[in-house]
Image: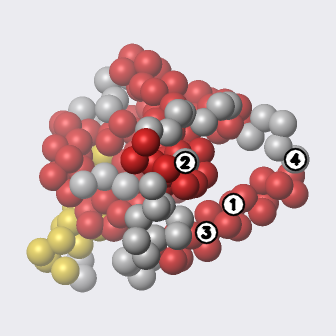
Amino acid sequence: MEQPEQGPAATEAVAGQSNWLGEVGLNGFAPYLMNRIMGRYNADLRRDMTALGLSTAKMRAIAVLSVMDGLQMSQLGVYAVVEQSTLSRALESLCSDGLCRRESDPDDQRASRIFMTRTGRAAFDQMWPQMAESHERMFEGIDEEERRAFLSTLHKMLANIRKHDF
Protein backbone atom coordinates (compact mmCIF):
# COMPACT_ATOMS: atom_id res chain seq x y z
CA MET A 1 0.00 0.00 0.00
CA GLU A 2 1.26 3.43 -0.87
CA GLN A 3 1.90 5.85 1.99
CA PRO A 4 -0.45 8.83 2.28
CA GLU A 5 1.05 11.98 0.83
CA GLN A 6 2.93 14.12 3.33
CA GLY A 7 2.15 17.81 3.68
CA PRO A 8 4.81 20.55 3.90
CA ALA A 9 4.78 20.49 7.71
CA ALA A 10 5.56 16.80 7.65
CA THR A 11 8.89 17.42 5.97
CA GLU A 12 10.11 19.84 8.63
CA ALA A 13 11.95 18.31 11.58
CA VAL A 14 10.61 18.92 15.06
CA ALA A 15 13.35 19.92 17.50
CA GLY A 16 14.46 17.00 19.66
CA GLN A 17 12.27 14.42 17.95
CA SER A 18 14.18 12.15 15.61
CA ASN A 19 11.21 9.90 14.74
CA TRP A 20 8.56 12.50 14.19
CA LEU A 21 5.40 11.15 12.55
CA GLY A 22 6.12 13.08 9.37
CA GLU A 23 9.45 11.30 9.07
CA VAL A 24 8.22 7.77 9.69
CA GLY A 25 4.84 8.30 8.03
CA LEU A 26 1.60 6.64 9.01
CA ASN A 27 2.69 3.29 7.58
CA GLY A 28 5.73 3.33 9.87
CA PHE A 29 3.71 4.21 12.98
CA ALA A 30 2.63 1.01 14.79
CA PRO A 31 -0.37 2.48 16.69
CA TYR A 32 -1.86 3.69 13.40
CA LEU A 33 -1.45 0.27 11.79
CA MET A 34 -2.85 -1.54 14.85
CA ASN A 35 -5.89 0.77 14.89
CA ARG A 36 -6.51 0.15 11.19
CA ILE A 37 -6.28 -3.60 11.66
CA MET A 38 -8.61 -3.63 14.67
CA GLY A 39 -10.99 -1.18 13.03
CA ARG A 40 -11.32 -3.48 10.03
CA TYR A 41 -11.62 -6.59 12.25
CA ASN A 42 -14.39 -4.97 14.32
CA ALA A 43 -16.20 -3.64 11.23
CA ASP A 44 -16.20 -7.12 9.68
CA LEU A 45 -17.71 -8.60 12.84
CA ARG A 46 -20.20 -5.81 13.50
CA ARG A 47 -22.68 -7.10 10.90
CA ASP A 48 -22.78 -10.56 12.51
CA MET A 49 -22.87 -9.15 16.05
CA THR A 50 -25.73 -6.81 15.21
CA ALA A 51 -27.80 -9.77 14.01
CA LEU A 52 -27.28 -11.30 17.47
CA GLY A 53 -28.12 -7.99 19.18
CA LEU A 54 -24.54 -7.46 20.32
CA SER A 55 -22.38 -4.34 20.26
CA THR A 56 -18.59 -4.45 20.14
CA ALA A 57 -18.44 -3.94 23.92
CA LYS A 58 -20.88 -6.80 24.52
CA MET A 59 -19.03 -9.08 22.11
CA ARG A 60 -15.70 -8.36 23.78
CA ALA A 61 -17.15 -9.03 27.23
CA ILE A 62 -18.68 -12.33 26.13
CA ALA A 63 -15.48 -13.36 24.34
CA VAL A 64 -13.39 -12.72 27.46
CA LEU A 65 -15.91 -14.51 29.70
CA SER A 66 -15.81 -17.51 27.36
CA VAL A 67 -12.18 -17.95 28.37
CA MET A 68 -12.06 -16.36 31.86
CA ASP A 69 -15.47 -16.66 33.47
CA GLY A 70 -16.20 -15.05 36.83
CA LEU A 71 -13.98 -11.98 36.55
CA GLN A 72 -14.54 -8.90 38.64
CA MET A 73 -16.03 -6.11 36.57
CA SER A 74 -12.82 -4.05 36.74
CA GLN A 75 -10.78 -7.00 35.45
CA LEU A 76 -13.30 -7.67 32.70
CA GLY A 77 -12.99 -4.04 31.58
CA VAL A 78 -9.21 -4.39 31.25
CA TYR A 79 -9.33 -7.68 29.37
CA ALA A 80 -12.20 -6.61 27.11
CA VAL A 81 -10.55 -3.21 26.49
CA VAL A 82 -13.78 -1.39 27.26
CA GLU A 83 -14.20 1.74 29.38
CA GLN A 84 -15.91 1.12 32.72
CA SER A 85 -19.01 3.20 31.92
CA THR A 86 -19.48 1.52 28.53
CA LEU A 87 -18.90 -1.91 30.08
CA SER A 88 -21.41 -1.20 32.84
CA ARG A 89 -24.14 -0.40 30.30
CA ALA A 90 -23.19 -3.41 28.16
CA LEU A 91 -23.31 -5.75 31.17
CA GLU A 92 -26.65 -4.38 32.26
CA SER A 93 -28.03 -5.28 28.84
CA LEU A 94 -26.26 -8.66 28.73
CA CYS A 95 -27.65 -9.56 32.14
CA SER A 96 -31.19 -8.44 31.28
CA ASP A 97 -30.96 -10.51 28.06
CA GLY A 98 -29.86 -13.53 30.11
CA LEU A 99 -26.40 -13.78 28.53
CA CYS A 100 -24.52 -13.26 31.78
CA ARG A 101 -25.18 -12.79 35.47
CA ARG A 102 -23.61 -10.80 38.29
CA GLU A 103 -22.79 -12.25 41.66
CA SER A 104 -21.35 -10.57 44.73
CA ASP A 105 -17.67 -11.30 45.13
CA PRO A 106 -17.36 -13.49 48.24
CA ASP A 107 -13.98 -11.90 49.02
CA ASP A 108 -15.04 -8.28 48.45
CA GLN A 109 -18.68 -7.31 49.01
CA ARG A 110 -18.11 -4.00 47.15
CA ALA A 111 -17.27 -5.88 43.95
CA SER A 112 -19.23 -8.18 41.73
CA ARG A 113 -18.14 -11.02 39.52
CA ILE A 114 -19.55 -11.60 36.06
CA PHE A 115 -20.43 -15.08 34.81
CA MET A 116 -21.56 -16.21 31.38
CA THR A 117 -24.85 -18.12 31.27
CA ARG A 118 -25.69 -21.02 28.97
CA THR A 119 -27.51 -18.54 26.74
CA GLY A 120 -24.37 -16.39 26.68
CA ARG A 121 -22.27 -19.41 25.77
CA ALA A 122 -24.69 -20.21 22.93
CA ALA A 123 -24.39 -16.62 21.65
CA PHE A 124 -20.59 -16.85 21.81
CA ASP A 125 -20.64 -20.21 20.03
CA GLN A 126 -22.72 -18.60 17.27
CA MET A 127 -20.29 -15.67 17.03
CA TRP A 128 -17.04 -17.63 17.23
CA PRO A 129 -16.88 -18.98 13.65
CA GLN A 130 -16.96 -15.42 12.26
CA MET A 131 -14.37 -14.25 14.79
CA ALA A 132 -12.09 -17.18 13.94
CA GLU A 133 -12.53 -16.62 10.20
CA SER A 134 -11.65 -12.92 10.53
CA HIS A 135 -8.63 -13.84 12.65
CA GLU A 136 -7.38 -16.34 10.10
CA ARG A 137 -7.92 -13.88 7.26
CA MET A 138 -5.60 -11.41 9.02
CA PHE A 139 -2.85 -14.04 9.03
CA GLU A 140 -3.33 -15.17 5.43
CA GLY A 141 0.05 -15.61 3.74
CA ILE A 142 1.93 -15.40 7.04
CA ASP A 143 3.79 -18.56 8.00
CA GLU A 144 3.75 -20.08 11.48
CA GLU A 145 7.20 -18.78 12.45
CA GLU A 146 6.30 -15.22 11.47
CA ARG A 147 3.01 -15.54 13.32
CA ARG A 148 4.72 -16.69 16.52
CA ALA A 149 7.29 -13.88 16.24
CA PHE A 150 4.50 -11.32 15.74
CA LEU A 151 2.57 -12.59 18.77
CA SER A 152 5.77 -12.56 20.83
CA THR A 153 6.36 -8.94 19.82
CA LEU A 154 2.78 -8.02 20.74
CA HIS A 155 3.22 -9.61 24.19
CA LYS A 156 6.42 -7.61 24.74
CA MET A 157 4.67 -4.41 23.65
CA LEU A 158 1.78 -5.14 25.99
CA ALA A 159 4.22 -5.70 28.87
CA ASN A 160 5.86 -2.35 28.05
CA ILE A 161 2.60 -0.43 28.35
CA ARG A 162 0.79 -2.57 30.95
CA LYS A 163 -0.76 -0.71 33.87
CA HIS A 164 -2.35 -3.73 35.57
CA ASP A 165 -0.80 -6.81 37.15
CA PHE A 166 -2.92 -9.10 35.01
- Dot in front, 4 or 2: 2
Label for residue 25?
2
The residue under the point 37% across, 55% down is 81
- Dot in front, 3 or 2: 2
Q: Are marks 1 and 4 in contact (CB under 8 Å)?
A: no
- Callout 2 amino acid: Gly
Question: x, y percentage for residue 94?
Answer: 26, 39
- Callout 1 amino acid: Leu
**Viewed as shown, does residue 98 lie left or right of 39?**
left
Question: x, y percentage for residue 21?
Answer: 48, 55
Is the residue marked by circle 2 packed among few (<14), some (14-19), or many (20+) residues within 10 Å? some
Residue annotated with mark 4: 143
- Callout 3 amino acid: His
Residue annotated with mark 1: 151
Q: Are marks 1 and 3 in contact (CB under 8 Å)?
A: yes
| Residue 142 seen by the camera | yes
Label for residue 110?
none
Question: x, y percentage for residue 155?
Answer: 61, 69
Q: Are marks 3 and 4 in contact (CB under 8 Å)?
A: no
Instruction: Name the quarter where the C terminus is drawn.
Output: bottom left
Q: Secondary structure at mark 2?
A: loop
